[in-house]
Every structure is written in structure tokens, then in C-alpha cells.
Image (cartoon, rainbow, N blue to C red):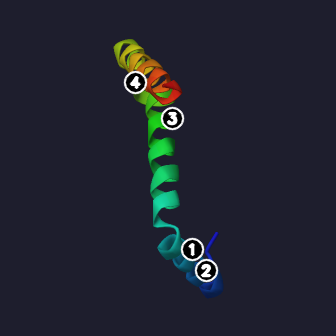
Amino acid sequence: MTLSEARKKANKKWDTENKARKNYINKRSIARNFVLKDGSAEDVDEILQLIMARKNKTKS
């Protein structure tokens, strides 16, 4: 499906005005896909440890 020129312009405007949000969404998607599709058991264990450490840090 191709996008209309108006939709392309609107997407570009949103991307420009919301760079931080776009980067956050992109990084979150990459992390989820890695865990779900590509990560080995060791990778998932390591990521889980990092998540727990981050969670404990944010509670403090």
C-alpha cells in the first residue's frame, strides 16, 4: 500500500516534532523483537538481570 503525499508529509512532520518519542518507540521495538525472535537463552537471562537491576534502581 502506498502512502499519499499528504500522509507522507504528515508523517515527516510528526517525526520531526517528536524525535525523542520516535527514538524511544524504535528502541523498544528493537529490544522486544530481539528477546522474542533472536536472543539465546543466555541473552535472555542477561537481559532479565539488567531489567531487574534497572527496576530496583528506579524504585530507589
Residue 11 position within the rendered picture, expressed as x and y whole percent measured from the top left: 58, 74
Residue at disc 2, secondary structure = helix
How far is disc 3 from disc 2 in space, using C-alphas? 27 Å
- Nearer the viewer's eye, disc 4 or disc 3? 3
Q: Which residue is mark 4?
A: 39
**Amino acid type at mark 3:** Arg
Q: Which residue is mark 2?
A: 10
How far is disc 4 from disc 2 in space, using C-alphas? 35 Å
Say above or below: 1 vs 39. below
Q: Which mark is residue 32?
A: 3
Q: Which mark is residue 14?
A: 1
Left or right of 13, for residue 27: left
- Nearer the viewer's eye, disc 4 or disc 1? 1
Q: Residue at 46% across / 60% down in the picture?
A: 20
How far is disc 3 from disc 1 in space, using C-alphas? 23 Å
Residue at disc 3, secondary structure = helix
Residue 10 position within the rendered picture, expressed as x and y whole percent measured from the top left: 61, 80
Residue at disc 4, secondary structure = loop
Residue at disc 1, secondary structure = helix
Disc 2, disc 1: CB below 8 Å? yes
Front residue of 19/42: it is 19
Labels 4 and 2: the sequence-earlier one: 2
Disc 3, disc 2: CB below 8 Å? no
**Amino acid type at mark 2:** Ala
Labels 4 and 3: the sequence-earlier one: 3
User: Crowding near pointer 4: few (<14 within 10 Å), some, many (20+)?
Assistant: some
